[in-house]
Image (cartoon, rainbow, N blue to C red):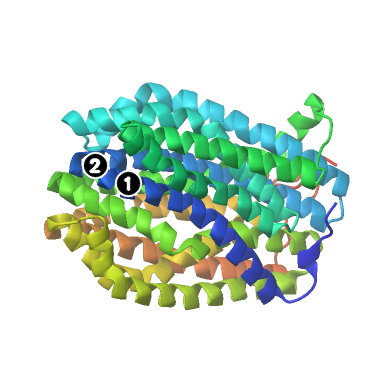
Amino acid sequence: MTEAKFTKGSTMRHVLVMASSGSVGLAAMFLADFINIYFVSLLGEVETAAVGYAVTITFFNTSVSIGLSIAVGAVVSHAIGSRRRQRARKYVLNSLIYSIAVALFAVAALWPFLGDLLTLLGAKGRTHDVAMSFLKIAIPSMPLLVGAMAMSGVLRAVGDAKRGMMNTMAIAIVNAILDPIFIFALSMGVEGAAVAMVFARGIAFAVGAYSVFVTHGLRTQFDWTRFKLHSVPITRVALPAILTNAATPIGTGFVVAAISNFGDDAVKGFTIITRLAPLAFGPVFALSGSVGPILGQNLGAKLYDRIARAFSDSILVTFIYCISIASVLFLLQNSIASIFDAKGDAASLIHFYCTWIVFIFFFQATLFIANASFNNLGRPTYSTMFNMGRATIGTIPFVWLGTPYGPEGIVAATTLGASLFGVASFFVAKRHIRQLATGEAKPKHIPGGRRRGFPFPLWPFSRPK
């Protein structure tokens, strides 16, 4: 079993290594969506808008998978940090089974309402039909994506950032190869993009399983009683983490519905920038998962000063990266619009985003880092509250304020709302970490311990022994 490598050495080095490797893996997953959008954009405006609506729903899959991978990483890294290696081994198997079970439930829950959700987002006529065809193929592959991301979380938790990156990179590589084959060579159109996505997720799942169970030998016998016991602490992290990440597609869905009033061209532009953002700012998104094992291992070892340093290092890396990549996007905005053959409202939205919005992305990004600290330092409900707040209070009234100014007004207003929640989460996270470091606050790890006013323990690692 891998040692608790994050409890010693430079925290900045650990942050940089985990962020860089994690960003490649996560950006690869977002690159898969970007590749899909690019090839689909060659089919026409209706197809691009249709996939834009569909991706808003499939992004829920991605959000659930990220939330579950955070939970997996949190419980495994904490066990490793506290030198409970056999317990960590059991958590690996049980958390993977738990994650796939949640994914199957999510697919069953979403399936009957796919058409209604598309209508709610504003899809109509042929655009609705094309989006529905895409979803009927893509949605059933959700368990494969969730399993692949969960195994990536395990690999990051044991400090194997390289292999954690490889299984998600497989998604982008396979998509890049299969998309043109299925979409154009086999004349499958949008359905071909969905089929390529399924193959990519399946291969990523296989790569992750080999790394976890063969390379690292993290195999153990399944025990139903132990699974039920472990599901308790896993749920305490997973439920808030899933709700935290699911808040993003909820807010995005509301924005898409508002932008759809300006036509398919505006939806196309918004689809492009929402796929461009996670690809360009991949390391920032990755930090929310990558910094978690660093915090978790040091918490397990009770090294609170290292937790504070890792958090500060993450914020500094985020700031430098955001400003740098924003400058690059500003210079490449004409090329981006040209690649996707964006015209009218689509082109205007891309230019507006690359000129103004990218330079204030850092304030939103602080929320990702704060969420990582909340999920791994015993306050997962904080991340849920901030993300749900951003998706509702930070989105709905701001959409109303921005609508009179067109798609650009909506994007600008919702960015402002998200930034306010990002800044607030930063100060709350700093305060909590400072209290841990000074002993003013202590995580509740007493077996069966509960906080008054809450129906469940906020601290996820209370039991089992």
Asked if the residue under mark 1 is in contact with the one under mark 2, i.e. CB atoms within 8 Å, the reply is yes
Dividing the picture into quarters, in which one does residue 448 lie?
top right
Closer to us: 274 or 210: 210
Residue 326 locus on image (x, y percent):
37, 73
Closer to us: 102 or 49: 49
Of the residues shown, which amino acid type is indicated by label 1? Answer: Phe
Q: Secondary structure at mark 2?
A: loop
Position above or below: 338 against 268? below
Residue placed under numbered mark 1 in the picture: 39
Residue at point 22%, 61% (across, down): 338
| Left or right: 449, with 265 as reference point | right
Camera sees residue 59: yes
Position above or below: 219 against 248? above
Dividing the picture into quarters, in which one does residue 419 lie?
bottom left
Residue placed under numbered mark 2 in the picture: 43
Q: Secondary structure at mark 1?
A: helix
Mark 2: few, some, or many residues within 10 Å (few <14, many ≥20)?
Answer: some
- Give me the C-alpha separation between circle 2 and circle 1: 7 Å
Dividing the picture into quarters, in which one does residue 229 lie?
top right
Position above or below: 358 against 399? below
Number of numbered callouts drawn = 2
Of the residues shown, which amino acid type is indicated by label 2? Answer: Leu
Q: Give the quarter of the figure containing the C terminus.
A: top right
Residue 289 locus on image (x, y percent):
59, 56
**Among all residues in the image, which is located at the extreme top?**
112
